[in-house]
């Protein structure tokens, strides 16, 4: 899996004058089952999150409210995606270094993850990540 596999998935929207509703069904709208949900909120101006890659974890990242930038890097190519729609999720496959910044005021970043939290699944050192990717 590479950077090209990391794509915006447009989620269904049920439009309603009372407010819109979007849906994520595991293994249907996204290519993995969901074992964990977490979210970032009360994010101070100028904050940077991420700064790691996952060995096996699949994730969908949604700007539930506000906006932010996600910078992806597979060790060869890089791309930046601006997230600002509640009905778009960015699918991030394993072995992708990510950094998230440029959070707007009041931004909420929701993450759906394919597995429970495990620190063993992280690469937190960029040079180590690059070395591993170079050997794949
Ligand atoms: P981290 O994944 O580095 O956050 P981000 O990528 O959003 O910047 O996690 C930050 C801290 O929170 C780290 O000490 C691990 C802990 N954590 C958990 O205990 N469980 C979780 O599900 C997550 C995502 C993080």
Image (cartoon, rainbow, N blue to C red):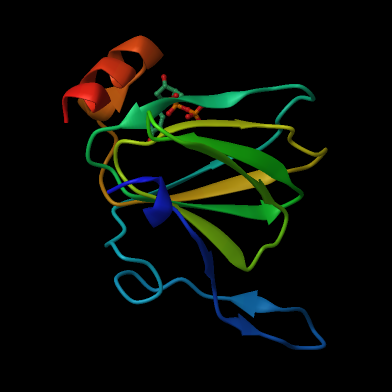
State the quadrant of the C terminus.
Answer: top left
- Residue at image coords 74%, 36%: 103
Q: How many marks?
A: 0
Q: Is residue 119 visible?
A: no
Give residue 13's quadrant in the image. bottom right
Residue 125: x and y in percent read 36, 12
- Residue at image coords 28%, 53%: 35
Is the residue 124 above or below the residue 92 in the image?
above
- Residue at image coords 77%, 79%: 19
Is the residue 18 above or below the residue 53 in the image?
below
The residue positioned farthest toward the left in the image shown: 136
Report the front residue among 133 and 14: 133
**11 horizontally vs 36: left or right:** right
Give residue 17's quadrant in the image. bottom right
**6 horizontally vs 42: left or right:** left
**8 horizontally vs 57: left or right:** right
Is the residue 96 above or below the residue 83 in the image?
above
**65 horizontally vs 28: left or right:** right
Give residue 109's quadrant in the image. top right
Residue 117: x and y in percent read 29, 35
Residue 77: x and y in percent read 45, 36
Residue 81: x and y in percent read 62, 47
Q: Is residue 35 visible?
A: yes
Is the residue 99 above or below the residue 114 in the image?
above
- Residue at image coords 46%, 71%: 24
Report the front residue among 44 and 82: 82
């Amino acid at each position: 899996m590479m950077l090209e596999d990391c794509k915006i998935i447009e989620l269904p929207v049920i439009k309603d004058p009372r407010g819109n509703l979007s849906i994520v069904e595991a293994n249907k709208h996204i290519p993995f089952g969901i074992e964990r949900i977490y979210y970032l909120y009360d994010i101070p101006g100028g904050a940077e999150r991420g700064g790691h890659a996952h060995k096996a974890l699949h994730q969908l990242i949604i700007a539930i409210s506000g906006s932010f930038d996600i910078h992806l890097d597979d060790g060869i190519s890089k791309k930046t995606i601006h997230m600002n729609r509640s009905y778009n999720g960015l699918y991030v496959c394993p072995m992708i270094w990510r950094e998230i910044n440029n959070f707007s005021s009041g931004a909420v970043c929701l993450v759906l993850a394919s597995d429970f939290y495990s620190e063993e699944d992280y690469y937190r050192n960029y040079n180590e990540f690059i070395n591993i990717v170079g050997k794949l």
